[in-house]
Image (spheres, grey):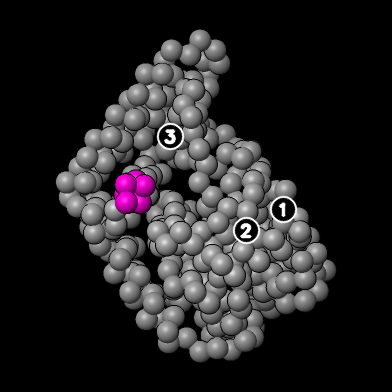
């Protein structure tokens, strides 16, 4: 399952699907992207679905989290990838697939052997992921933390993620760190494994300070929920007081990173851009309240119940083309004509 807006970057996924001998699903954002992706995949034998998931596609249900006030500030890119991954989950259920792999188009170093080993682990775990070591898959604030000399870990997320499609009954909410929330239940049940370390195409995390601002709410929610797990708590422990303290800690962290960056004596341009990104994140953080965090978690939990009801009502078609038609995804010939 490859959610993409860069159809020219599918080479790795196409080669991997061919070598593994599995179906390939490419979900674009526009008809134009899907048309180009179709041409890219033309030589691949076996089951291939190339389509696009437009913003008004209703196959993944109207979500309460999508109506949350904070969602007005969430950039379309975070909503877009969550929507595509949810469509991927529905396709897997309709096709009666045992295991699916979400793969971003910028992930590198995957081999058929590594995929096979990871897929075997889904017999024991709900999800199996990889750490992205280079270029580290972190938020902008976390990249600034690393730049300032902090010990910054990498969470294995949705960039390369194998899922037991039969047991997967959760969804990707429309927020930055949507994969963290998707994996929350598996992590809570200790049913999430890490199969190794991969790399991704490098990028400049500080190139656009607004990127840090766009990630801030998702960082607060995800970091806050996983802190609860580390403390042995549950979602029910994420009270208003808990989120008030989480916001205070986050504010201290950003200020602390900025203070450490100011002590750097080298690479002034990079430091300057990092500080601007932290400033954008800090400004965005100032507008987030404990009530916003609390209400988002309530909306997310409600969405999970709605999602599970939808999964329970899906037929088993065992046919990729039929599954795409059921979800009203545009067909290949239509993409090519447009």
Q: Main secondary structure of the magenta part?
A: helix
Classify 10 Å Cα crowding around label 2: few (below 14), some (14-19), many (20 and above).
many
Q: For residue 203, what is the image quadrant?
A: top right
Where does the magenta region start and end?
A: 227-232
The answer to whether the residue labelled 2 contacts the one labelled 1, judged by CB atoms less than 8 Å apart, is yes
The image shows residue 139 at horizontal and vertical percentages of 47, 40
Q: Is residue 185 above or below residue 108?
A: below
The image shows residue 30 at horizontal and vertical percentages of 57, 64
Dot 3 or dot 2: first in sequence order is 2
Q: Secondary structure at mark 1?
A: loop
Q: CA distance from mark 3 to mark 2?
A: 24 Å
Q: For residue 69, what is the image quadrant?
A: bottom left
Dot 2 or dot 1: first in sequence order is 2
The image shows residue 70 at horizontal and vertical percentages of 29, 52
Q: What numbered label is drawn on residue 110?
A: 1
Q: Residue at x 38, y 75 (%)?
A: 307
Q: What numbered label is drawn on residue 12?
A: none
Q: Residue at x 52, y 15 (%)?
A: 268
Q: CA distance from mark 1 to mark 3?
A: 27 Å
Q: Residue furthest top?
A: 265
Q: Is residue 6 visible?
A: no
Query: The C terminus appears in which quarter of the rendering?
Result: bottom right
Query: Closer to the camera, 265 or 253?
Result: 253
- From the image, tell me which residue sits under label 3: 141
Q: Is residue 184 above or below residue 279?
A: below
Q: Secondary structure at mark 3?
A: helix
Q: Residue at x 70, y 48 (%)?
A: 108
Q: Residue at x 17, y 50 (%)?
A: 240
- From the image, tell me which residue sits under label 2: 103
Q: For residue 284, what is the image quadrant?
A: top left
């Amino acid at each position: 399952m490859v959610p993409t807006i860069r159809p020219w970057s599918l080479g790795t996924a196409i080669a991997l699907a061919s070598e593994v001998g599995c179906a390939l699903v490419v979900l674009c954002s526009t008809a134009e992207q899907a048309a180009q992706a179709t041409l890219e995949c033309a030589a691949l034998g076996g089951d291939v679905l190339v389509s696009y998931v437009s913003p008004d596609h209703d196959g993944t249900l109207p979500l309460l989290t999508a109506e949350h006030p904070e969602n007005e500030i969430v950039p379309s890119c975070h909503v877009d990838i969550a929507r595509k991954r949810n469509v991927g989950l529905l396709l897997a259920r309709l096709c009666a697939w045992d295991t699916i792999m979400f793969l971003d188009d910028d992930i590198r170093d995957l081999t058929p052997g590594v995929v096979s080993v990871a897929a075997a682990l889904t017999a024991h775990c709900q999800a199996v992921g990889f750490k992205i070591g280079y270029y580290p898959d972190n938020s902008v604030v976390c990249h600034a933390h690393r730049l300032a000399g902090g010990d910054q870990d990498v969470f294995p997320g949705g960039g390369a993620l194998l899922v037991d499609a039969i047991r997967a009954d959760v969804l990707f909410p429309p927020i930055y760190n949507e994969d963290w929330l998707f994996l929350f239940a598996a992590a809570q049940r200790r049913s999430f494994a890490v199969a190794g370390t991969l790399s991704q195409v490098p990028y400049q995390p500080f190139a656009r300070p607004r990127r840090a601002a766009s990630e801030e709410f998702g960082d607060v929610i995800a970091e806050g929920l996983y802190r609860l797990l580390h403390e042995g708590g549950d979602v029910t422990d994420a009270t208003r007081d808990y989120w008030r303290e989480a916001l205070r800690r986050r504010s201290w962290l950003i200020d602390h990173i900025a203070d450490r960056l100011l002590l750097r004596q080298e690479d002034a341009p990079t430091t300057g851009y990092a500080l601007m990104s932290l400033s954008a994140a800090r400004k965005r953080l100032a507008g987030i309240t404990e009530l916003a965090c609390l209400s988002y978690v309530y909306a997310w939990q409600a969405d999970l119940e709605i999602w599970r009801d939808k999964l329970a009502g899906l037929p088993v078609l065992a046919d990729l083309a039929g599954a795409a038609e059921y979800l009203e995804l545009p067909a290949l010939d239509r993409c090519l004509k447009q």
